[in-house]
């Protein structure tokens, strides 16, 4: 019998704020069994999502790539022939050297993202970029909109300890479908409800499973969260629920805010959000009467053209009530600012040259098709290595992305675990390891733990880790950095020591390190992280979270005080619907779209349509429909549902392009236009038309 012979301590590597601590069953045959959440880690608290619990299905999948491949058919055809590692790496190195000789080093653009969140495996590619002066990568897809919104208020990516939810009397889950995407958050909120009668408020643009489990569920129109926040604050001031002692001591412009909000009434917000006045009043009354209200602000509602402004507006509410003063009160969006790791060795920051251009991740289509603005006036991109991401499915404006990857003169190498939509366009495909097959460290996004996930099992013969590939390539293209001669464990140990976070041996023995600052620091009781020590209602959008090395943004038109900023893609006669590309429960971005159980549960690419809209357009559940706008069209199946309100369409999950009737994925419809203040793609801010078939 293939019983577990040991339990291996690990960490979930996927792009999810929960970054769960895992106990992984390792079987006698060297395979893994069931994956459990670590009980002793207080945020994970023994709970993981179902898709990771059944990870054996993914890591031992018969379709895993295990052999380097060379393209033998047209780009995108998926026709490949096996080759050896040496030949594959030779071809990759030669393509990079050729591009550099002919067009300069900036014609090479290493491209990566969050398929693994392990720092060594995800970010080691940056060391190669900097050492070789290749075009730098400017990250905009995930956090580019929301982080500036949070930083505008607090000055730091730090929030109240999420474990304090145990002491909350009200938990506001805003713009994140926690049941599907942050199962631990829901666990803590439900425990607070059970143990102390806490109320759960959930806010989203359709009735998600999280809203169905909430005590107060608010379905707002996409991009209208700022209006809701303003009306709530209007009521708080009107009804004497603003904490003026707190406001005077800890915030920058409370009187200006009070004046500004005079016209932001519930009736004003009702017209914008689609909520009733009564619901807005109910929410405001609850928050006003509940000092220990914890605002867990998600990423979802920031994926709008006005997303940074919306996030800042929601963040202003606990500053008005003074909820920050209380255990179980305040706000949290991301804890990414607390770890303070010295990333020099991992990313080769000592070799970084700020004069080398940074190309915007979201604009990969424009970059690869030679748009002069996207290329910052520099040479065309002629060669790329892609790790941990699948831009042919997840990047916006897919029509351009597809044209770019189809270029005959572009050399593309994709280092991947499965034959993704992007890998199908590669000239060379390299097989990659998964997290249980290599060593790495992980920082929490939705919590405060720094964790080590060590190698548990041998990879399939033929797979190599990102670190191995980067170091090998560095040698072949003449990139110099001492990190290329170090093992992941050596890099981790030196990084921890340089960051004053102990040693690898200590972290491995303890499994995790709790990096949460003190209660007073986490609640900013000794001052917010702006120079004046105040929470800022008046946002200084020009203050870049990227420092002087980052791109400057388009921030002139952003409202300084919290408001509804009406810049989103509006519906009109030709495009009567708003579409959001929300997460699916059984996928994580485009990951897990290969595993049979996840696919079976998600069924097929589909769009949720309100019954009234469906009747008006003449569509029934199961019908093929076409969604379109100026950026393109895609066909998928209709699901008639009570969950989205009239006028809002929801397509959950990023399916491979090959699963769509015409091979065109959902991001055919999304825009790559840069969102203020510093760029990013508004994935949930899409106007479309809908027609049968
Ligand atoms: S995907 Fe998220 S919830 Fe699931 S195990 Fe990983 S970190 Fe935890």
Image (spheres, rainbow, N blue to C red):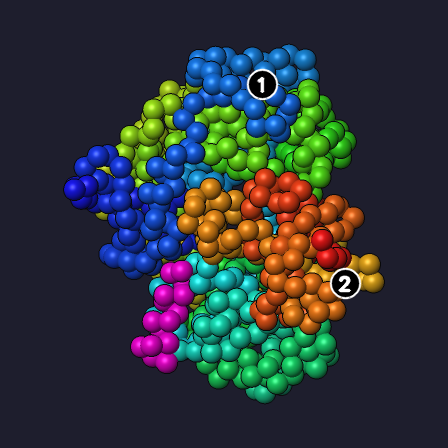
Q: Earlier in the sequence, mark 1 or mark 2?
A: 1
Residue with the mark numbered 2: 576
Q: Residue at 54% across / 22% down in the picture?
A: 80
Which residue is at the far bottom? 239
Q: Is residue 527 left or right of residue 406?
A: left
Q: Nearer the viewer, mark 1 or mark 2?
A: 1
Q: Judging from the image, what secondary structure is the residue with disc 1 in?
A: loop
Q: Is residue 77 above or below residue 360?
A: above
The magenta segment is 183-197
Q: Is residue 122 above or below residue 170?
A: above
Spatial CA distance of label 1 from label 2 is 44 Å
Expressed as whole percent of the image width and height from the top left, the position of residue 378 reads 72, 26
Find residue 256 and report its image quarter. Answer: bottom right
One can see residue 308 in this view: no
Which secondary structure dominates the residues rendered in magenta? Answer: helix
Find residue 283 and report its image quarter. Answer: bottom right
Please tell me how crowded label 2 is: few (under 14), some (14-19), or many (20+) other residues with Cα within 10 Å. Answer: some
Q: Judging from the image, what secondary structure is the residue with disc 2 in?
A: loop
- Pick the residue in front: 630 or 281: 630
Residue with the mark numbered 1: 72
Q: Is residue 85 above or below residue 51?
A: above
């Amino acid at each position: 019998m293939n019983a577990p012979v040991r339990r291996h301590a690990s960490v979930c590597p996927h792009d999810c704020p929960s970054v769960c601590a895992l106990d992984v069953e390792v079987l006698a045959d060297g395979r893994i069994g069931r994956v459990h959440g670590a009980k002793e880690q207080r945020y994970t608290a023994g709970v993981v999502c179902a898709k990771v619990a059944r990870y054996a299905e993914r890591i031992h999948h018969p379709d895993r790539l295990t052999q380097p491949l060379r393209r033998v058919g047209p780009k995108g055809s998926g026709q490949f022939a096996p080759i050896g590692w040496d030949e594959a790496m030779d071809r990759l190195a030669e393509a990079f050297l050729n591009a550099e000789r002919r067009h300069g080093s900036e014609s090479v653009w290493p491209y990566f993202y969050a398929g693994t969140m392990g720092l060594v495996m995800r970010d080691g590619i940056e060391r190669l970029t900097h050492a070789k002066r290749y075009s730098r990568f400017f990250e905009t897809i995930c956090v580019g909109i929301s982080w500036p919104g949070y930083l505008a208020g607090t000055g730091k990516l730090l929030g109240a300890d999420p474990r304090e939810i145990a002491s909350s009397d009200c938990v506001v889950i805003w713009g994140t479908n926690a049941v599907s995407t942050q199962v631990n958050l829901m666990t803590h909120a439900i425990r607070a409800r059970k143990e102390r009668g806490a109320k759960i408020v959930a806010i989203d643009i359709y009735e998600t499973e999280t809203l169905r489990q909430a005590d107060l569920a608010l379905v707002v129109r996409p991009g209208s969260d700022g209006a809701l926040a303003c009306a709530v604050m209007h009521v708080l001031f009107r009804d004497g629920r603003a904490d003026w002692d707190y406001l005077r001591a800890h915030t920058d412009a409370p009187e200006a805010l009070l004046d500004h909000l005079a016209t932001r009434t519930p009736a004003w917000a009702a017209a914008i959000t689609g909520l009733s006045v009564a619901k807005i009043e109910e929410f405001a009354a609850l928050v006003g009467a509940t000092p220990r209200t914890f605002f867990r602000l998600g990423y979802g509602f920031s994926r709008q053209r006005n997303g940074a402004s919306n996030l800042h507006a929601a963040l202003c509410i606990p500053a008005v009530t003074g909820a920050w003063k209380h255990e179980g009160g305040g706000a949290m969006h991301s804890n990414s600012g607390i770890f303070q790791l010295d990333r020099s060795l991992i990313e080769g920051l000592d070799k970084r040259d700020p004069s080398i251009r940074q190309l915007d991740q979201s604009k990969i289509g424009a970059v690869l098709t030679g748009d002069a603005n996207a290329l910052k006036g520099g040479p065309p991109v002629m060669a790329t290595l892609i790790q941990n991401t699948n831009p042919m499915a997840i990047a916006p404006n897919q029509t351009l992305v597809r044209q770019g990857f189809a270029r005959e003169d572009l050399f593309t190498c994709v280092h991947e675990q499965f034959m993704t939509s992007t890998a199908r366009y590669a000239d060379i495909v390299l097989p990659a390891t998964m997290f249980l097959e290599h060593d790495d460290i992980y920082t929490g996004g939705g919590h405060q733990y720094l964790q080590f996930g060590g190698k548990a099992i041998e990879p399939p013969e033929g797979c190599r880790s990102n670190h191995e590939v980067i170091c090998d390539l560095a040698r072949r293209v003449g990139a110099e950095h001492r990190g290329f001669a170090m093992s992941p464990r050596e890099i981790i140990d030196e990084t921890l020591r340089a960051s004053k976070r102990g040693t690898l041996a200590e972290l491995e023995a303890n499994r995790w390190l709790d990096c949460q600052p003190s209660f007073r620091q986490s609640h900013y009781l000794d001052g917010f992280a702006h120079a004046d020590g105040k929470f800022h209602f008046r946002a200084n959008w020009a203050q870049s979270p990227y420092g002087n090395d980052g791109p400057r943004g388009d921030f002139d038109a952003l409202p300084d005080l919290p408001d509804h900023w009406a810049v989103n893609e509006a519906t009109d006669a030709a495009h009567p619907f708003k579409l959001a590309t929300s997460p699916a429960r059984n996928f994580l971005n485009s990951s897990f779209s290969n595993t049979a159980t996840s696919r079976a549960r998600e069924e097929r690419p589909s769009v949720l349509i309100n019954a009234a809209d469906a009747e008006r357009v003449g569509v029934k559940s199961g019908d093929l429909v076409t969604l379109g706008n100026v950026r393109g069209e895609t066909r998928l199946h209709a699901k008639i549902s009570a969950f989205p309100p009239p006028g809002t369409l929801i397509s959950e999950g990023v399916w491979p392009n090959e699963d769509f009737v015409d091979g065109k994925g959902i991001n055919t419809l999304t825009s790559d236009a840069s969102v203020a203040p510093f760029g990013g793609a508004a994935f949930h801010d899409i106007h479309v038309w809908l027609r049968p078939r």
